[in-house]
Image (cartoon, rainbow, N blue to C red):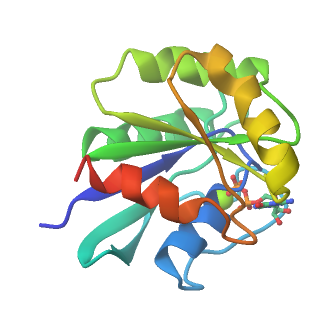
Amino acid sequence: SLPIVAILGRPNVGKSTIVNRLAETKGAIVFDEPGVTRDRTYQPAYWRDREFLVVDTGGLIFDDDTEFLPLIRQQAMAALAEASVAIFVVDGQEGPTTADEEIATWLRQQSVPVLLTVNKCESPEQGMAQAAQFWSLGLGEPYPVSGIHGNGTGDLLDEALKHL
Ligand code: GDP
Ligand code: MG
């Protein structure tokens, strides 16, 4: 069976956009409403002749008590359990949030390797500084990317391949 790359993060950081970018398909549905992805969707993806599956998860909400919370968290945990590597997406334009810190704390307790991916870094000049804000999450090097424009996703996938 193909190795799995799980995409995690709070709502609206650009998880679905990144999944679309990595899979180069339009199969995933991208909306502005936070946490709109309710079901795990598996997208086939290729990088440097390696094939794998990218799984989108519903937005991880730790603070909020919406009715979707238990289901979404359960799905995220199920996705993580079967993944070879996790891509934890954060918003470089917003900077680290309390929810990011809570997710990071949880991820540090899991055994799967985590790639901290700082999305919405369109500008090469600002991208490094935007990414650097996230060293505080304690998950190692933050990778600046733009899911919309595609910058940085090659470096991210090179890093992900090391764990597949
Ligand atoms: P999800 O809830 O984490 O799956 O986030 P989505 O992929 O649905 O994106 C949420 C919002 O962020 C949408 O308005 C996207 O257009 C926007 N977005 C996603 N990726 C980027 C990016 O690389 N740059 C910018 N500026 N906006 C982005
Ligand atoms: Mg989504």
**Residue at coordinates 38% horizontally, 75% vertically from top-left?**
45
Query: At 51% across and 70% down in the image, what residue appears?
Result: 22
Picture coordinates of residue 37, whole percent (x, y): 62, 60
Q: Is residue 53 left or right of residue 58?
A: left
Quarter of the displayed picture in which ligand 1 can be seen: bottom right
Residue 110, can we see it? yes
Q: Is residue 65 visible?
A: no
Q: Is residue 92 left or right of residue 4?
A: right
Q: Quadrant of residue 109?
A: top left
> Which quadrant of the figure has residue 43?
bottom left
Instruction: Give coordinates of residue 71: x percent, y percent.
Output: 51, 41
Q: Relative to 78, is 106 above or below?
A: above
**Residue 103: where, in percent of width, then height?**
58, 24
Give 152 or 66, whichever is nearer the viewer.
Answer: 152
Query: In terms of depth relative to the viewer, which is nearer, 148 or 25?
Result: 148
Q: Image point 72% across, 45% down: which residue?
A: 11
Q: Is residue 83 left or right of residue 36?
A: left
In the image, residue 10 sits, relative to residue 154, either above or below, namely above
Quarter of the image with the N terminus is bottom left
In the depicted structure, whether residue 156 falls above or below residue 138: below
Residue 28 higher or lower than 109, as above or below:
below
Residue, far left: 1
Disc count in the image?
A: 0
